[in-house]
Amino acid sequence: MLTANEIRESFKSFFESKGHQIVPSAPMVIKDDPTLMFTNAGMNQFKDIILGNHPAKYKRVADSQKCLRVSGKHNDLEEVGHDTYHHTMFEMLGNWSFGDYFKKEAISWAWEYLVDVLKLDPKDLYATVFEGSPEEGLERDNEAASYWEQFLPKDHILNGNKHDNFWEMGDTGPCGPCSEIHVDSRSEEEKAKVPGSQLVNKDHPQVIEIWNLVFMQFNRKADGSLEGLPAKVIDTGMGFERLVRTLQGKTSNYDTDVFQPILKAIADMAGTTYGNNQQQDIAMRVVADHIRTIAFSITDGQLPSNAKAGYVIRRILRRAVRYGYTFLGQKQAFMYKLLPVLIENMGGAYPELIAQKDLIAKVIKEEEDSFLRTLETGIRLLEKTMADAKAAGKTEISGKDAFTLYDTFGFPLDLTELILRENGMTADIKEFDAEMQQQKQRARNAAAVETGDWITLKEGTTEFVGYDYTEYETGIL
Ligand code: ATP
Ligand code: MG
Ligand code: MG
Ligand code: MG
């Protein structure tokens, strides 16, 4: 059985053998793009080449890209830990052609890699093609279908709609149809009952998408119309953890050697084993997932803070700490102790982790300590608030209470909502927003000047205006 590290290498050497330049992952944190806080797909670092703003140094490249999907267009946070194939941070394997090869090669190399090199069983594979969009004058992607037909029977080639099978960079710009490869890893018995073709793109945990091949062949103009793209682009992305799970014959990404060492370390710490108790398993998956996100963010230059991208990271860390606290008995800082295992596992592929290991540990421990100081009191307050609401026959707590938790106890709103959800309750978000606005106004009146992650008080002002008010300005709460 190939290890995860061997699989990552095999992808790179396969595409190297097809004339691709192997490039390093771009940082997961993006500092110079107002439209994006974190890399959420392999193509991000090539955006300017695709838009034609930059010449391509190499016409064929491939890599493994650190991605994070916790905000904006792609936000998988709520799924993470609850399902077994969406992560916050994951690695996306990808190959690109900038005005060089197109659909034929992209499809046949994907097939060659999965079936000839990695020995996946073609019986388990499905490909989707864009079904067309008559109102836009777009035909079904018969070209892609004709290449798939060389490898797959017709009932394994499925039509997909615009949502799943037409990729657009934005309202304008490069776009085109895509073909996705899905793998059915159910038992033979299950497959006999329901054909995999009926379960593709239906959120079945054993029939999952592994690879998306995007064929950029159009340019969308400002008036919405499409014109042909002079230099066509291939942009592919394959979920590394999903590929590893498939190859290692597992039914969950967390059962692979990508996650097992971390899960074991968490279970040892909690004096339990993974796979015994559903609620604890979710908590362990959340912690195992989030430690990667936090460690890599810090390494790539984004520390937890009170604003924007920093607050996203802080929220993720607090989410993990709360799961550990409530379900795994972790009353002291514990996340930072997982770093040696993570580094042992991933430091080879991402040496930046090794180079910054002391900084990462220090930052995480300080964050944990600071949140743990108020967590217990906050949880008790929330429990009392929920009990009072229930006693009054309500399933909603007031926005004021949610705001107190946020402002005084450092509970991000989505953490409060998560705990409420676990108890079948909600919060009055409108009132929470109103409280937040008032808080901001008070802060403005006190003449605070925001400089990045800090609040500097103007000379002569002595009133403390609260360092938390910028937290809400992340646009994702
Ligand atoms: P899904 O439908 O499963 O959410 P997607 O269509 O949003 O995936 P793409 O944007 O096509 O994903 O990204 C390319 C590949 O990256 C996917 O085929 C999948 O293998 C992987 N991937 C996407 N999101 C995640 C995630 N949150 N965690 C792990 N892998 C992911
Ligand atoms: Mg998705
Ligand atoms: Mg999809
Ligand atoms: Mg997709």
Image (tube, grey):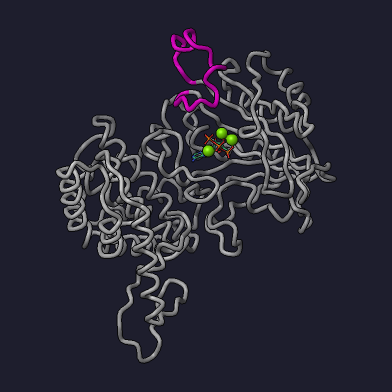
Q: Quadrant of the C terminus?
A: bottom left
Give the vertical position of 51 relative to 142 (above or below): below
Residue drawn 65% across the image and 39% down it: 236
Please say whether residue 340 is visible from this viewpoint: no
Question: Image check: 174 left or right of 298?
Answer: right
| Residue placed most toward the observer, 473 or 119 | 473
Query: Which quadrant would residue 150 be assigned to in this image?
Result: top right
Give the vertical position of 155 relative to 112 (above or below): above
| Residue 260, image x, y percentages | 36, 37
Residue drawn 17% across the image and 58% down it: 377
Query: Which quadrant would residue 226 be assigned to in this image?
Result: top right
Question: Image check: 168 left or right of 368?
Answer: right
Query: Which quadrant would residue 177 be assigned to in this image?
Result: top right
| Residue 426, image x, y percentages | 30, 45
**Residue 202 magenta:** yes
Q: Which residues are magenta?
A: 185-206
| Residue placed most toward the observer, 410 or 121 | 410
Q: Among all residues in the image, which is located at the extreme bottom?
A: 460
Looking at the rendered structure, the number of numbered marks drawn on it comes to 0
| Residue placed most toward the observer, 145 or 287 | 145
Residue drawn 41% across the image and 54% down it: 294
Please say whether residue 407 is visible from this viewpoint: yes
Question: Image check: 208 left or right of 446?
Answer: right
**Residue 144 magenta:** no
Question: Image check: 433 left or right of 172?
Answer: left
Residue drawn 50% across the image and 47% down it: 69
| Residue 423, image x, y percentages | 24, 40
Ligand 1 shown in quarter: top right
Give the vertical position of 129 relative to 95 (above or below): above
| Residue placed most toward the observer, 300 or 118 | 300
| Residue 2, image x, y percentages | 50, 31
Give the vertical position of 418 relative to 449 (above or below): above
